[in-house]
Amino acid sequence: MRLALAEARRAGEAGEVPVGAVVVNAAGEIVGTGHNERERTADPTGHAEMVALRRAAARLDAWRLEGCTLVVTLEPCTMCAGAAVLARVDRVVYGAVDPKAGAVGSLWDVVRDRRLNHRPEVIAEVLAPECGALLTEFFARRRVG
């Protein structure tokens, strides 16, 4: 999660919402990293998780990311939770809860929907205060500025 937090800080420094993500393989190696880049790329799918999943798939030369863990500083939205399911990651680990758009237990629970053919394990609220503080500070600065 500390590496995902470093990615989130990079996003914040670039004027993006500070969310970071990493994909770790079964051996504990980082195979993909990402942070929000929607503003920079004008890409609505430029969420940290999507960037990290794409990079992991490219590095592993496989769309199935079995054995991998997606670690993200904010609870994934429906798009990112769906991507995690479709990529077949073994687990999703997240920091701050997102009661407005979270799809890993808060507003929806996409990853544990029994109708889907894959359901990753979920580990929630890892370093949640730290992850949440980045977002709170970012939006407080935007309201003032």
Image (cartoon, helix red, strand yellow):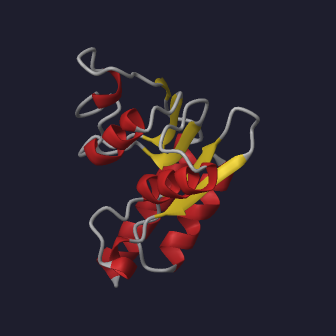
Q: Nearer the viewer, residue 73 or 132?
A: 73
Q: Quadrant of the image for the C terminus? A: bottom left
> Along the horizontal axis of the image, is 36 left or right of 34?
left
Residue 45 sits above or below residue 101 on the image: below
Residue for point 47% across, 51% down: 132
Residue name at image x 28 percent, y 21 percent = 116
Q: Quadrant of residue 42?
A: bottom left
Seen in the picture, residue 61 relative to 109 is either above or below; the reply is below
The spot of residue 82 in percent (x, y) is 31, 39
* Vertical arrangement, residue 53 with respect to residue 93, above or below: below
Q: Nearer the viewer, residue 128 or 87?
A: 87
| Residue shown at 57% from the left, 67% from the top | 9
Q: Compared to 134, does 23 lie above or below?
A: above
Q: Position of residue 141 (x, y in %)?
A: 40, 75
Q: Quadrant of residue 106?
A: top left
In the rendered image, the residue lying farthest to the top is 114
Left or right: 80 as drawn, with respect to 49: left
Residue at image position (52%, 29%) is 91
Q: How many marks?
A: 0
